[in-house]
Amino acid sequence: MSSHIKVVVWNEFRHELEDEKVKQIYPKGIHQVIADYLKKEQFHVETATLDEPEHGLTNEVLDRCDVLIWWGHRAHEEVKEEIVERIHKRVLQGMGLIVLHSGHFSKIFKKLMGTSCNLKWREANEKERLWVVAPGHQIVQGIGPYIELDQEEMYGEFFDIPEPDQVIFISWFEGGEVFRSGCTFTRGKGKIFYFRPGHETYPTYHNAEILKVIANAVRWAAPVDSAEITFGNVKPLEIIKSIEVGKTS
Amino acid sequence: MSSHIKVVVWNEFRHELEDEKVKQIYPKGIHQVIADYLKKEQFHVETATLDEPEHGLTNEVLDRCDVLIWWGHRAHEEVKEEIVERIHKRVLQGMGLIVLHSGHFSKIFKKLMGTSCNLKWREANEKERLWVVAPGHQIVQGIGPYIELDQEEMYGEFFDIPEPDQVIFISWFEGGEVFRSGCTFTRGKGKIFYFRPGHETYPTYHNAEILKVIANAVRWAAPVDSAEITFGNVKPLEIIKSIEVGKTS
Amino acid sequence: MSSHIKVVVWNEFRHELEDEKVKQIYPKGIHQVIADYLKKEQFHVETATLDEPEHGLTNEVLDRCDVLIWWGHRAHEEVKEEIVERIHKRVLQGMGLIVLHSGHFSKIFKKLMGTSCNLKWREANEKERLWVVAPGHQIVQGIGPYIELDQEEMYGEFFDIPEPDQVIFISWFEGGEVFRSGCTFTRGKGKIFYFRPGHETYPTYHNAEILKVIANAVRWAAPVDSAEITFGNVKPLEIIKSIEVGKTS
Amino acid sequence: MSSHIKVVVWNEFRHELEDEKVKQIYPKGIHQVIADYLKKEQFHVETATLDEPEHGLTNEVLDRCDVLIWWGHRAHEEVKEEIVERIHKRVLQGMGLIVLHSGHFSKIFKKLMGTSCNLKWREANEKERLWVVAPGHQIVQGIGPYIELDQEEMYGEFFDIPEPDQVIFISWFEGGEVFRSGCTFTRGKGKIFYFRPGHETYPTYHNAEILKVIANAVRWAAPVDSAEITFGNVKPLEIIKSIEVGKTS
């Protein structure tokens, strides 16, 4: 049932190569862990990383992509404007986009939101509990009232994003903050899901519930086969009196 | 793919029995035309009407219903409070609800909206053009930039509903009005779609695009298999200092 | 500047008369503490309570009321349907409504929301921290990044309300839950603000920031002098071709 | 009551200098007509135009500006990135922004929306009727059920913007289209209002109701004196167990 959806999992893929701790958790990279899970769920999955030519996101790759998953952190500035424009155009055309964790500061997410996407943060191995606040939403299929993560980085409000279409998760943090951790947006024909957890020094993407949410979000964000949008100058569909009587300038 | 979704098409079924003009357009009733189409689309379909015992909406029927479609007009007041309560409870639990045309004034829709659901109206055989304003939404799959109906009853703004989750269609009327003709709402775990067209004296439910929108809406509104919601008094998930030191009242 | 806004503070006023602990905190009732503050802020203020005739909410009182503040808890069922209808009608006409704390379960709030308004709760003297998530909103004028309350009752998600127009506050609770503690809604021409804190056994309405939020909300919810809404059958504003050619039924 | 609000009316100011027809309608420029009205309404008003140094929008001007009104059309590309960044930053800090008519394609509006902001259009001297769909909103104070303009340029859906916070006006056009003509958005602490009418070849900004809407929108968009938003690394507000036991990395 998921097999016709084509997913590209994009990862910056730097921490995993340079940081021993991260390498131990994600020896083949965060993208591979997510891709392996999605393959088991019968999606058609590709991966792409920053240091590939065109960041692995050629026109061919993006043209066949239904849903793009994005993880980036320390190298947002290295993502080329041209590729950001290409992704942006595809989202408006209907490609789904799932932005994970520190991807909140990626060029593509900031461009789509129109805000700073800034927030508070802290690395203190603290507990996060993600409460479901939209229990009928497709993204929480099979998920209980909350997801608990023993140790995560904290992101705290105010999170400078536009009012989401729907808030799906709100996080409680041991250190005293809250965060809108799962948010949906629509831009053009494209559906966007921001999902907060996933700091590179924690095994978050090995968590079965986190993976299930990502798979649900892929299904939700897949494009709909609706009419192509047309813009620009158009003829009237009804008679305009001023035209009838020859008043048009 | 749609066959697992169980739909109940409910119709007041009075006009078709009493009004010659309506009988000619819908000899077996509006519900049958919609039900026949949905069956072809592989849904599991039942019908129910006002004058059946319990309006055809027994606990058994509603318990197995994934999505309820509602058409009513002149006999809203005859729908029993007890049945309205029953439907309301099921929507909050996740049953989808599609409210058609004059169902805007049904007890169940007004109860779910919390407003008067009042509007302007006129019967003058005028043209309606429903413009798509959410072109990436599942409900407009396969639909072009607009749907045109040669003759319909007019409904005009202000339409007294809460701000919808998303506006899908906005109607243009020949006589000079506009209307938010396709609106989505969430109540509890239930998804609701209000869809304006469908006055009984016009063959609107024989229109292929109108039927396609209804089928899309059924797929969209079908419940998600998420955790049951629990409410009420709960124990803390974390240690509360006042409890530790015995201060709790 | 606030003096032209007419506020009615409504209170159930039972706990304060029957419970020693509550009486000590609010000897004249919760309504008096709020009313006294609003008077200092130059509003025109009246109070009303459950056990007055018509619950103190006669047609005359409601007709001159710009914003109604509502606190109720144990006696929701004693509020007469007739008075609920009266308030409902006035909200749709533009009267602002501020629902405090356990008023989430009042008849008027449930009627306006269309949902169960149910939630999780616990009385354990725990800390609540209300984070501002809409920092540009009129309701948080003069408020910092959060409000902290040393001891409050806990309300936890899932809170069964429709998607708010805007979420203004999200609460963090010591015991591990979160809650959408400040939410705005529009119903008809009326603006509604739900504000969570204020359990009767804590001195919450003596807190300067909580009072400031209530005063800000009154200013925000005051009605706008816009045109009266008209509904019903209307003549066309443009020529309809079918009418011209005599086709109208 | 409006006198403390500082408004800057920005205009491209090219059509009025180069096109005879436009010059006759707005001899001193669109900005002067709007500015003159707002001065009568007791606002503190300045104007700024494209061909002034820094487009008239120096840091000093923007720092003291509460609400910026923007009219641009043919020279969007000439607006310098640096000035766009400056305006964007100020909006996130709380400065209100009112974008008029063809300003939908300005750099600043597209940057704040994150979408193409594209639409359909036609110049055919056709009738526009703007229906109020949020009758309790401050922006429609003193406005009836609709505003009628005898001749305007047409803008038609699909309008590629994110779901607005609230839709205030929906336009009916003689030629058969509809348009979300009045839309509110929040970005950071800033309030944004997009207001469609105002093509340069029509006397739209001499219309009393259009001017009233603009003045109402200025009052609505004026910044609120709330706490400065802080972002970045923060200390915990509560004890984190992992820190207590020295586990922090």
Image (cartoon, coloured by chain):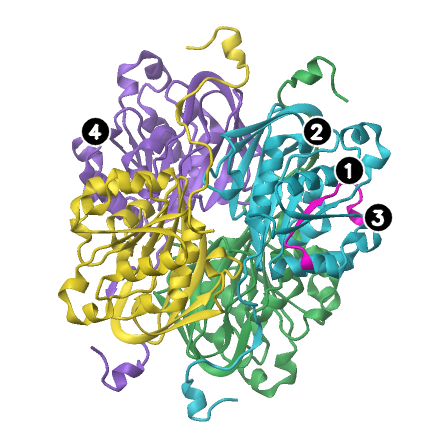
Chain colours: A purple, B green, C cyan, D yellow
Determine whether the residue tagged by mark 2 lies in a helix, strand or loop.
loop
Q: Are marks 4 and 3 on the same chain?
A: no
Question: Which residue is the site of mark 1?
Answer: C29
Question: Which residue is the site of mark 4?
Answer: A78
Q: Are marks 4 and 2 on the same chain?
A: no
Q: CA distance from mark 4 to mark 2?
A: 53 Å
Residue pictured at 32% horizontal, 60% vertical: D36
Write down the region rendered in magenta.
C64-77
In the image, residue A119 lies in the stretch drawn in magenta? no
Q: Are marks 4 and 1 on the same chain?
A: no
Q: Chain of mark 2?
A: C
Counting residues from the start of the chain, the first of labels 2 and 3 encountered is 3
Where's residue A23, x and y in %?
A: 32, 16
Q: CA distance from mark 2 to mark 3?
A: 23 Å
Determine whether the residue tagged by mark 3 lies in a helix, strand or loop.
loop
Residue pictured at 41% horizontal, 61% vertical: D213
